[in-house]
Image (tube, helix red, strand yellow):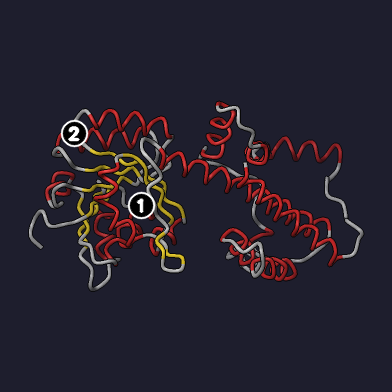
Amino acid sequence: MSTSSYDFGLVGLGVMGRNFLLNVADHGYPVAGYNRTPSKATLVEKESGENTVVMGVSSIETFVSVLKKPRTIMLLVPAGMAVDDLIEQLTPRLDKGDIIIDGGNSHFSDTLRRIEYLNKKGLHFLGMGVSGGEKGARFGPSIMPGGDKEAWEAVKPILEAASAKVHGDPCVAYMGNGAAGHYVKMVHNGIEYAIMQLISEAYQLLHEGLGLNNDELHQVFKEWNEGGLQSFLVEITRDIFLQEDEKTDNRLIDMILDEAGSKGTGKWTSQSAMDLHYPVPTIDLAVSLRDLSGYKKERASIEKIYGPSESKIETDKDTFISQVRDALYMGMVNCYAQ
């Protein structure tokens, strides 16, 4: 293709960035990806489909030069300093009216600061949440853009094409001005923290309390996912119980350490809610328990003194499974209501 003929550019060709770029290309848009590591730039071209137009480059000058004006450039890099560094590298090479999209998990306050900074330079900035993990990025994520309305209208066709579809409707919409996109993504992640905690507690009650094995747990979650609890998180929980561990003869679920990390978005949700004097106790507790799980050494020491915490639940199995299902459903409703 000739120079300046690529519709969409993306910076950061890790798994998420590479998958999102290939997703856009699959929908007929010529795309260019930039990564300072040449091997990553080469990989995105190798993974592209036969009927797509994909360029990978390790030169930021070349990257900017091949994009159609006004340029659309999406950043998919770790939140924080990396975003600011790239903005500083890009802005001297851009023209007024060009669009920068931050598709990472940036704090909304950083997004507000960047909007103001780039607006003075005549550049548009969108803070955009992207949900769905690696598979979603490749085949259709949920997308939450916010910021400059003019920029949203310009990129809307590309984002609608790349997004997930439900009954034919694209899972993308303009969230509002300023940092609305990243704020919505933050709350989305806070809700996700809470639902994952609820699912973990349901698992503990059924496994340690009721004594269900992994095959039985798979069947329970399968039935739940076919009813009122149908959701992505319940669906993948169903599948986890059958996943074999590659290093042993055990199921993977039995080999995972009971210690969870985080990227901070759940904590940000709780902090923002407290700033607004708006109670979100289900999310707050999920954040606290995730933090508590990190004290693995201390928990192991306490268990040696007081013994294990699990105890068997003696009751009718079917009745108890039904009660746990109803409790999980109510907990999920609470997450969304809060």
Task: Give the side of residue 197 with respect to residue 91, left or right.
Answer: right
Q: Quadrant of the N terminus?
A: bottom left
Task: Give the side of residue 133 with respect to residue 311, left or right.
Answer: left
Per the rendering, the mark at residue 14 is 1
Measured from the top left, where is residue 209 in percent x and y? 83, 56
Residue 6 drawn above or below residue 64 = below
| Residue displayed at 60% across by 27% down | 277
Instruction: Identify residue type, mark 2.
Output: Gly
Measured from the top left, where is residue 53 in percent x and y? 20, 65
Marks 1 and 2, the one that precedes in the sequence: 1
Measured from the top left, where is residue 5 in percent x and y? 12, 57
Q: Which residue is more in the foreground, 85 or 129?
A: 129
What is the crowding at mark 1: few (fewer than 14 residues within 10 Å), some, or many (at least 20)? some
Q: Quadrant of the C terminus?
A: top right
- Residue 99, by quadrant, is top left
Q: Which residue is more in the foreground, 75 or 145?
A: 145
Per the rendering, the mark at residue 122 is 2
Instruction: Identify residue type, mark 1.
Output: Gly
